[in-house]
Amino acid sequence: MCLAIPAQVVEKLENTMLKVRVGNGPTLLTASGMLLPEPAEVGDYLIVHAGFAMKKLDPVEAQESLAAIREFATALDREGQL
């Protein structure tokens, strides 16, 4: 099972490559933007899978997804499952 977490573009690199921040944490990844229908810009939220940006997200949709993931992780932590 794969879980896609919104990632925010923090830097545009050479060729369609992007530096993205995963969720709200300190984790940064390099992802290819070559599959996106239009170029990503700094500040855009994306769904990244296997190193490829698959889709742009609306900022509100991205924040709602991140909040739901945090809520789920908190519930698991309370039950000792994390």
Image (cartoon, rainbow, N blue to C red):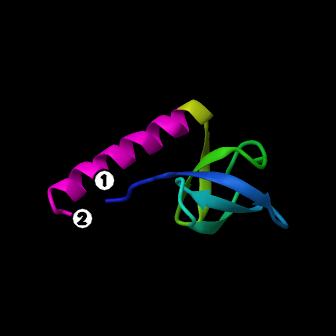
Vertical position of residue 71 compared to residue 50: above or below: above
Judged left or right of residue 2, residue 22 is right
The answer to the question of whether label 2 and label 1 lie on touching residues, with beta carbons closer than 8 A, is: yes
Q: Which residue is drawn at 39% across and 55% down?
A: 3
Question: Which residue position holds label 2?
Answer: 82
In this picture, which residue range is highlighted in magenta?
61-82
Q: Residue at x 61, y 48 (%)?
A: 46
Residue 79: x and y, percent?
A: 14, 56
Q: Is residue 77 magenta?
A: yes
Residue 27: x and y, percent?
A: 56, 67
Q: Distance between the residues labelled 2 and 1?
A: 8 Å
Amino acid carrying label 2: it is Leu
Decide: few, some or many residues near mark 1? Use Cα within 10 Å; few <14, some 14-19, many ≥20.
some
Judged left or right of residue 13, residue 77 is left
Question: Which residue position holds label 1?
Answer: 73
Q: Which residue is drawn at 62% across and 59% down?
A: 21
Please state, as top left, top right, bottom left or bottom right, where the C terminus lies in the image: bottom left
SS label for mark 1: helix
Mark 2 or mark 1: whose residue is earlier in sequence: 1
Q: Can residue 58 be seen in this view?
A: no
Q: Residue furthest right?
A: 14
